[in-house]
Image (cartoon, helix red, strand yellow):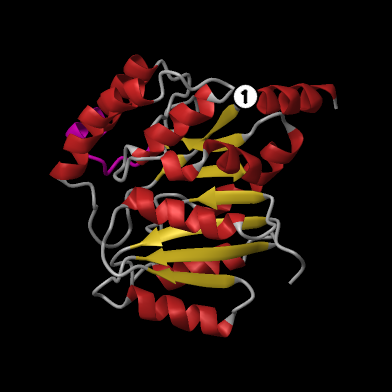
Amino acid sequence: MSDPELAVVVPTYNEARNVVAMADALLALPLALQLIIVDDNSPDGTGDLADQLAAKDPDRIQVIHRPQKNGLGRAYKQGFQQALRGDVPLIAQMDCDFSHSPDYLPTMVETLRTTRADVIIGSRYVPGGELDEDWSWWREALSQWANFYARAILRLRVRDATAGFKLWRREVLAAIDLERVISNGYVFQVEMAYLTQKLGFLPIELPIFFEDRRIGRSKMDIPVKVEAAWRVLELLWRYRKVKRTTQNEERKTATQSR
């Protein structure tokens, strides 16, 4: 394989029925990519399957084993940090349950290459974006309310503040400084979106169809929802003094002049 242009970070917990199919779908894309699977000691054997995949294709698949289920945010942070140790210029994040279709990745990469964007967001809530019709009305209402709440409190400009399907330029993740990111549940996505905006980076939202998970159960439990509600207010206070940096402004000006 030529030098990878893209690292895809995929956290897993009890995704034994999805992880092989997801790996196959990603590696079949017309992209020079590497896959980083971050498994939280899944009792259903997901980690063992990931190891078997890596043994067959060690140049393209890496597996990080964590000793226990320790939160989505920490899983992403560890995967991002692993990707940043290499030279890959682009880093993607996505779920393993096919709610995020791998087929969108080539378009996301092309958009990042041909625009001034610093991060591409697979968005459910821009024109053209859709939610699976199998979602219940209350689940859709909860998602819409969570986005409205986060956007109103933090004055976020992105429409899908809780989106988990993103493609980053590596320098954005480096500038965010992952060690200071505190959220560990699904509000991790909100915190990353907020820091992206506060630091002056440019997101572009592309519409996606968000499919209900094909196999397995959602991990969005009550403690995660409670954390999301109070953590947004904490973010507002914690990052009140964060401002866009001179380096970001200079890089933005240089990008615009090209």
Asked if residue 127 shows in the view, the reply is: yes
Q: Quadrant of residue 16?
A: bottom left
Q: Is residue 130 above or below residue 236?
A: below
Tell me the quadrant of the picture where the N terminus can be found: bottom right
Residue kind at label 1, given as amino acid type: Thr
Q: Where is residue 183 in the image (x, y as percent from the top left)?
A: 33, 40
Which residue is farthest right?
258
Q: In this view, does 204 lie above or below 31?
A: above
In the image, residue 138 lies in the stretch drawn in magenta: yes
Q: Is residue 136 above or below residue 194?
A: below
Number of residue marks:
1
Considering depth in this image, is 128 or 226 the residue closer to the camera? 226
Q: In which quarter of the image is residue 15?
A: bottom left
Q: Where is residue 93 in the image (x, y as percent from the top left)?
A: 49, 50
Residue ID at (70%, 56%): 5
Q: Name the residue under label 1.
A: 245
Residue ID at (24%, 52%): 218
Instruction: Determine crowd level at label 1: few under 14, some 14-19, many 20+ residues with C-alpha closer than 10 A.
Output: some
Horizontally, residue 37 falls left or right of residue 15, namely right
Q: In which quarter of the image is residue 248?
A: top right
At numbered mark 1, what does the secondary structure look like: helix, strand or loop?
Answer: loop
In the image, residue 92 lies in the stretch drawn in magenta: no
Residue ID at (54%, 60%): 82
Which range is magenta? 131-141
Q: Where is residue 233 in the image (x, y as percent from the top left)?
A: 27, 23
Residue ID at (45%, 57%): 78
Q: Where is residue 45 in the image (x, y as percent from the top left)?
A: 30, 78
Q: In this view, does 63 lie above or below 126?
A: below
Asked if residue 95 shows in the view, the reply is: no
Horizontally, residue 59 falls left or right of residue 8, namely right
